[in-house]
Every structure is written in C-alpha cells, then in structure tokens.
Amino acid sequence: IPQVKPSEEDEESFCSPAPVAVWQQRAAVHLARSSCEQLHVRGCLQQGGGEKGKKQMNKQLVSAVIAENLSEAERAVSGGADVNARDALLHTPLHLASASGNIEIVRMLVDARADVRVRGQDGDEPCHIAASQGHMRVLEFLLQHGGSLDSYNNEGMTARHLINISACVISAQDIAMEG
C-alpha cells in the first residue's frame, strides 16, 4: 500500500492528510475529519482558481480519495484538481483508490482521464496496487480501460505475479484461522 507522508506544509494546513491507520480503521476521528474536509473543499471552491487554489484542490482530492469520500472527490475534480497529480513517491489519486479498492472512486478518476498506466517511484501502476491488495473488481476495471497485467515494476514483478502472491497470502490467512 502506498504510504501517505504529509509534508511540513500539509501539517500546517487547515486539514492535514489523515494518517494511514485512521483511514484504514475508519475511526471516529475520520468522521470528524471528513466534515472538516467538506467545509475546506467548499472554501477552496469559493476562493476560485489560481495556482495555490489548484494545489489545494489537489490536496483535497487526495484527502477525499484516502477517506473514500466519492462526493468530495468529485467536488475536488470539478473544482480543478488534477487527477494525475503526484505525491513525493510519484503516486497519483488512482494509485490510492486502487489500494483502497473503492471501485466508485476508481471509476470517477478514470472517467476524469486519470492515467491508468502511470508509474509510481517503485514502478507500480494502479494495476500492480489493486492486484497486490486483492481488489479484483478494481483490477478488472483498470484492465478494461488500458491497464496491463504484464508490465514490470522496479522489482521485476507484474500485476499477474502480484495476483498470485495476494491469493497465497489470503489462503495462508484462511488456513491459519481454521487451525
């Protein structure tokens, strides 16, 4: 899973990115944060464009994708967020949505022209991420829209390899729970 590392600038902003543990567990803090994000996105839309406004909308898109909040992600995109904006690890919102398995957000990003073949710093495309997390619906959708099972990441792995590894891990977990 791509790690979200806030910069100093993010930490100083009105709403900094949620820690990975919070968004994975969907804790009560996450719900309060979602309300904060909604207010902040609306404020950005009211302030209008400009480079600073666009940068802020990109941050809001990432926050909405992490929070799996489709309506706020749509609002950020309609407000001018770049669906192909990259973080420090060269991951895009589509990488993050593929990691969470949220097919609705993946669909919205692809419909907004997110690049399904974009590579992160590690060479992973969204298909690699979806495959490694076992999100087969997302993987199938990405493949239907130009993704590849056979492109190699920096470790020499393809999405096809990662599907098999993911299946083995899930099987091992099932066996451990039975035993």
Image: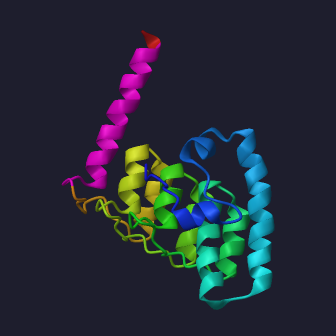
Where is 47 relative to 170, above or below? below
Task: Looking at the picture, tell me which residue is in the foreground, 112 or 84.
Answer: 84
Q: How many marks are shown on the rendered structure? A: 0
Q: Quadrant of residue 39?
A: bottom right
Q: What are the residue bounds of the magenta stretch?
A: 155-177
Where's residue 134, x and y in %? 43, 43
Q: Residue at x 56, y 70 (%)?
A: 109
Extreme residue toward the left, this view = 156
Q: Quadrant of residue 61?
A: bottom right
Where is 33 relative to 110, above or below? above
178 left or right of 30?
left
Let me know if residue 158 is in the magenta part.
yes
Task: Looking at the picture, tell me which residue is in the foreground, 106 or 124.
Answer: 124
Where's residue 159, x and y in %? 31, 53
Where's residue 163, x and y in %? 34, 45
Q: Residue at x 70, y 39 (%)?
A: 27
40 left or right of 152?
right
Task: Looking at the picture, tell me which residue is in the foreground, 101 or 50.
Answer: 50
Quadrant assignment for the C terminus: top left
Extreme residue toward the top, this view = 179
Let me know if residue 20 is in the magenta part.
no
Where's residue 129, x and y in %? 40, 53
Figure coloring? rainbow
Q: Main secondary structure of the magenta part?
A: helix
Q: Residue at x 65, y 54 (%)?
A: 67
